Image: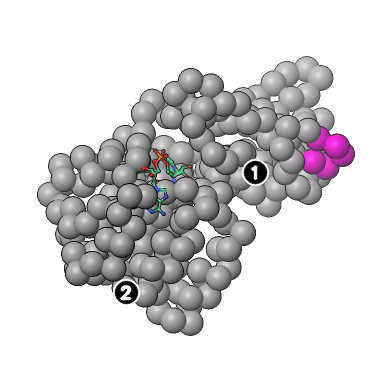
């Protein structure tokens, strides 16, 4: 498969190694210094583009991929207020876009576990719930996209919680997410249920970026011959 990389930072470089090890070809690499490469024939020849850039640049990159008719797999976080526009373009204009706030297979197992636990805990109001996410100091957005997906899994299933909040819980119906930035941590997510008598904690701790990068390459393999708006649930079918 021919892959174009948009964003050649920590994720882009890890994805390149994994894609090559799985027998794929990297036909185009775009970063902040050569944005015009996205209009090149090499870019247009790609079966799929994998985009990991920044919250401020991702949406514009998607538009350029759509204009070149190259399907996009993206994991950039912090731009999701515009996801409705992308879904519309996939539905009405036949574009192809795969998004995951977290491409790690383990995290997606954790998402399923989180929803299942929340369904159980909905029956036990003696427990309050909070979340914590820890990432490296270079991360631009907070809370993490993964924490937001986890929070949505809790809010869908626990009737006594209405919205997630960053750092503070003003009301009992708030689900607080505490965001910690330290060192080079690839990503830790914890959901804690606490009553007067005990504490239940579930936790995912990524050892490196390799899990995210492998998931993104597997998603690219899945996406290359598909149409529409896709996500991990379409691919993993739990
Ligand atoms: N979904 C997931 O599984 C997952 C996993 C890890 C990181 N992320 C997210 O992916 C994004 C990138 O993470 P990273 O750790 O690789 O960051 P990074 O800062 O190491 O890399 C980002 C790269 O994008 C480049 N860039 C900036 N603007 C650009 C533009 N207009 N066109 C092309 N390239 C441009 C930067 O120069 C940089 O090299 C972040 O939003 C992060 O939160 C998602």
Figure quadrant, ligand 1: top left
Residue 164 highlighted magenta (yes or no): no
Report the residue at 48% width, 76% height from top: 89
Question: Foreground: 224 or 129?
Answer: 224
Quadrant position of residue 186:
top left
Position of residue 187 measured from the top left corner of the image (x, y, whole percent): 48, 31
| Other-residue count near label 1 (Cα within 10 Å), few / some / many at <14 / 14–19 / ≥20 | many
Q: Vertically, is 169 above or below 180? A: below
| Other-residue count near label 2 (Cα within 10 Å), few / some / many at <14 / 14–19 / ≥20 | some
Q: Which mark is residue 151?
A: 1
Residue range in magenta is 169-174
User: In the image, is 226 to the left or to the right of 90?
Assistant: left
Position of residue 170 measured from the top left corner of the image (x, y, whole percent): 85, 37
Q: CA distance from mark 2 to mark 1?
A: 34 Å
- Position of the N terminus by quadrant: bottom left
Q: Is residue 188 visible?
A: no
Q: Earlier in the sequence, mark 2 or mark 1?
A: 2
Q: Are marks 2 and 1 in contact (CB under 8 Å)?
A: no
Report the residue at 37% width, 50% height from top: 32
Q: Which mark is residue 69?
A: 2
Report the residue at 54% width, 39% height from top: 140
Position of residue 205 measured from the top left corner of the image (x, y, whole percent): 47, 27
Q: Which mark is residue 22?
A: none
Q: Residue furthest right?
A: 171
Question: Foreground: 120 or 40?
Answer: 40
Q: Is residue 58 visible?
A: yes
Q: Residue furthest top?
A: 197
Residue 171 highlighted magenta (yes or no): yes
Magenta: main secondary structure = loop
């Amino acid at each position: 498969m021919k892959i174009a990389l948009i964003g050649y930072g920590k994720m882009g470089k890890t994805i390149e190694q994994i894609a090559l090890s799985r027998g794929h070809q990297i036909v185009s690499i775009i970063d902040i210094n050569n944005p015009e490469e996205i209009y090149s024939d090499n870019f247009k020849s790609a079966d799929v583009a994998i985009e990991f850039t920044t919250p401020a640049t991702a949406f514009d990159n998607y538009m350029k991929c759509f204009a070149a008719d190259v399907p996009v797999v993206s994991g950039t976080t912090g731009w999701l207020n515009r996801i409705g526009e992308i879904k519309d373009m996939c539905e009405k204009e036949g574009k192809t876009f795969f998004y995951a706030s977290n491409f790690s297979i383990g995290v997606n197992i954790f998402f399923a576990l989180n929803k299942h636990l929340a369904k159980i805990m909905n029956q036990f109001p003696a427990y309050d719930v909070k979340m914590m996410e820890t990432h490296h100091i270079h991360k631009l957005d907070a809370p993490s996209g993964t924490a937001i997906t986890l929070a949505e899994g809790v809010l869908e299933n626990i009737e006594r919680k209405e919205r997630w909040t960053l750092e503070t819980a003003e009301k009992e119906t708030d689900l607080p997410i505490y965001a910690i930035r330290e060192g080079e941590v690839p990503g830790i997510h914890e959901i804690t249920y606490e009553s007067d008598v005990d504490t239940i904690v579930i936790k995912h701790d990524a050892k490196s970026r390799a899990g995210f990068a492998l998931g993104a390459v597997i998603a690219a393999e899945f996406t290359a011959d598909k149409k529409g708006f896709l996500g991990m649930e379409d691919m993993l079918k739990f």
